[in-house]
Amino acid sequence: MRISSFLVICLMFLLTSCDLYTGSFVVNSSSEKITIDIKYNQNNEMIEKYVKHHNGFEGFVKFIRDYYNSSKGNLIKMDSSKYTATIELNKKDTLRIWGGIHQSNDFDEIEEIVIRSNKKQTTIKGEDFQDVFDKNGSVYIYTVQ
């Protein structure tokens, strides 16, 4: 398990080191599916510009998924009134959380992320988001015990 975690971290480092819009990653190391709700900050100036540029929230989420999301996860739901995208990850899947529109990882664009399985739920609020990912080398490994 430790070797696979180390390999995932090395892989994520390689993937992020050549991309200006780096983002961070959630890795599902549990044996079951998990869902991740990403709530974008509706009051963020850059989010407003990107949503307008992509003809609405749905277009914005599809843009992120198609161009910046190195993920095997399935987009299962979008709520444009709450600026929330819900993604499902199978066992061993990785989701790239896109942030840092200004080519940084400040994640002002994200209000919160909720990661849940049948057994537990983890919420990372926007103000804590950067700290959580910095402590883990831009990778958050989700484990159901």
Image (cartoon, grey):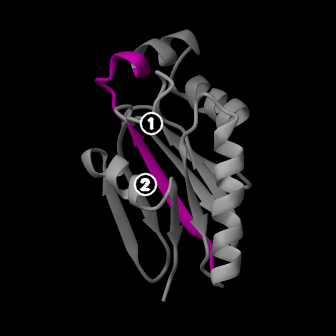
Question: Three-letter amino acid code at disc 1?
Answer: Asn
- Left or right of 109 on screen, residue 68: right
From mark 1 to mark 2, how far is it between C-alphas? Answer: 10 Å
Query: Do the numbered discs 1 and 2 sit on residues whose CB atoms are within 8 Å?
Result: yes
State the residue in front, 20 or 28.
Answer: 20
Query: Which mark, residue 120?
Result: none
Q: Residue furthest bottom?
A: 145
Residue drawn at (49%, 11%) of the image: 52
Task: Kindly identify which numbered label has been placed on residue 133.
Answer: 2
Q: Position of residue 35 (x, y in %)?
A: 54, 62
Residue 37: in magenta span: yes
Residue pictured at 52% horizontal, 19% vertical: 56
> Quarter of the image holding residue 81?
top left
Which numbered tag is attached to residue 105? 1
Q: Is 130 drawn above or below residue 53 in the view shown?
A: below
Magenta segment: 32-47
Compared across the picture, whether 114 is left or right of 77 comes to left
At 33% from the left and 57% from the top, the residue drawn is 124
Badge 1 crowding class, 10 Å Cα cut-off, few under 14, some 14 to 19, many 20 or more, is many
Q: Is residue 126 above or below residue 2?
A: above
Tell me if residue 105 comes above or below residue 54 in the rendering: below
Q: Is residue 116 left or right of residue 28?
A: left
Q: Residue 75 appears at what percent x and percent y?
A: 64, 48
Residue 73 seen in the figure: no
How busy is the neighbourhood of tag 2: few (under 14 within 10 Å), some, or many (20 plus)?
A: some
